[in-house]
Image: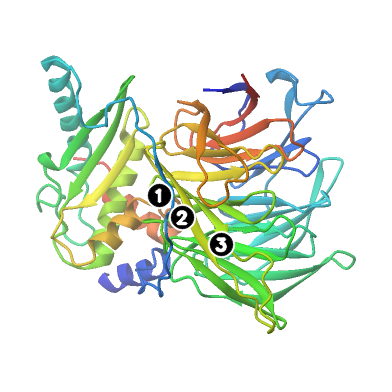
Amino acid sequence: MFLTFLGLFQLFMMSSATNGPSSEADTDSEQTHQCGEAEPGTSRGRDDEEGENLEDVAADIYDLIKDIRDPEKPNTLEELEVVFEEGVKVHPIKGQSDRYIIRVEFKPTVPHCSLATLIGLCIRVKLDRSLPQKQKVDIFITKGTHATENEINKQINDKERIAAAMENPNLKELVEKCVADNDT
Amino acid sequence: MRGNLENVASLTGHLDRVWHVSWNPDGKLLTSCGGDKTIRVWGTHSKSNEGQGSDWTCKAVLQDGHSRTVRRISWSPCGSLLASASFDGTTCIWSQKNAEFECITTLEGHENEVKSVCWSPSGSLLATCSRDKSVWIWEVDHEDDDYQCVGVLSVHTQDVKNVCWHPHKEVLASCSYDNTIKIFQEEDDDWCCVCTLTGHEATVWGISFDKTGTRLASCSDDNTVKIWQDCNPDGQDGGSSRKTSWKCICTLSGYHTRTIYDIDWCKHSGLLATCSGDDTIHVFQENSVGSSYKPGFSLMACVTNAHSEDINSIRWNPNGDGFLASCGDDGFVKVWKYSQC
């Protein structure tokens, strides 16, 4: 079963290779626009009620992902502490109520690259399907928990790679098993 | 801001996200493709694109050409052929007459998803690129409908996202998940990489030449646009190999707050359009043409919530009338009219 995951990941997600030689690129003119709006993540002048609301939203989102099954073990991601409530952060988007930037952090149980990417894929698919409204979702591995975290984060957040991976029937089946709602 | 973008049409029909939009060479047809595995061809009844939303109709739906997502489409310069690139690993060539299409050939060879396809300005070459890290060059014989692969270039170290030809020379640019842009040319009958442009800090999703082909604009997952200058456009060093050198002369940051998925540099107006995962479209204009090495760009127009989700593609109408097409994860294809205030 483990080999199957590896095989599939090599085939469909293509783990990283080394970077080629770099050549210089002097940037002569840096033009940085100062946005008038608040950066996402700050809550300019929002009152306590709104702050609580964000916590509720985060809690609701956590509820959606905590029962995702681990690809290998007969446990949920919550049971294995791969996902945790504090790992879900919700940032408002100024001028848009009910629209957020959602950041989900997770800690893979094993350092293996393919499994970590698969878990990230499952989280993304589950949220894409279950959220009442389309939201911006960024998924990351907890810093320091994995040697190739940058490579994994890059794959999980490349929506073209995710879309292509989910068109592969074998991989799709794996993901479906993990994200299926419990019948009990 | 000194410009304005007005939404003139919102086209529905696609059953999944729309990945790409492309105008045909005379600007009368708009094609789109996406996750529902189809290509849709849209046009208006009226003589110009000034028609109201209700004038736009879907003239054709090309299905059964691909078994997976259609990622990109490209019209041949003569306007009678359409190439489509798909996650199923193939590139289809469609022949069209009076908005009726027929698949005349399927190009195979890439090991996995084909991410982009683009016709050269003469129509005699076709370029494709893929997650298999390679860029393929195909020679086209229009009389025999024959397509021969004349180059397989595996110089990128990761997934190649897009390819784009120089506006009038047989020079190709590609951009990749490896954060670089590469320039390819034929030298001594062999296609090779003549330059690598580094500077972006994340995946480069789109590239577009200006009308002279001496400048290239790129957009990236690092939320910036970079402008690159060909520092030696006419250079011949006496020998058979032509030295080429591109430098980044400007970076536009702070405008988009999420990945910039596509960029298009209008060959008529010089306006630069970008679209992003932040659901906005931005239009920039260079401040003064001629101050070559340190240009500045002004934001002329910006539409927030241009789509209700990520915007994947943006294209100026090639006839220069100021129409702009966009498409997104919301399944919509939208047409905009740009005007100066």
Disc ID at residue B221: 1
The location of residue A67, given as percent across then percent down, is 18, 44
Q: Residue furthest right?
A: B143
Image position of B160 with respect to A84: above or below: below
Q: Amino acid at mark 2?
A: Val
Q: Count the marks.
A: 3
Q: Are marks 2 and 1 on the same chain?
A: yes
Q: Amino acid at mark 3?
A: Ser
Disc ID at residue B204: 2
**Mark 2 residue element:** strand
- For image coordinates 75% across by 21% down, the residue present is B50
Q: Are marks 2 and 1 in contact (CB under 8 Å)?
A: yes
- For image coordinates 11% across by 16% down, the residue present is A48
Categorize mark 3 by other alpha carbons within 10 Å: few (<14), some (14-19), many (20+).
many
**Nearest to N terminus: mark 3 or mark 2:** 3
**Nearest to N terminus: mark 2 or mark 1:** 2
Disc ID at residue B174: 3
Image position of B339 with respect to A108: above or below: above
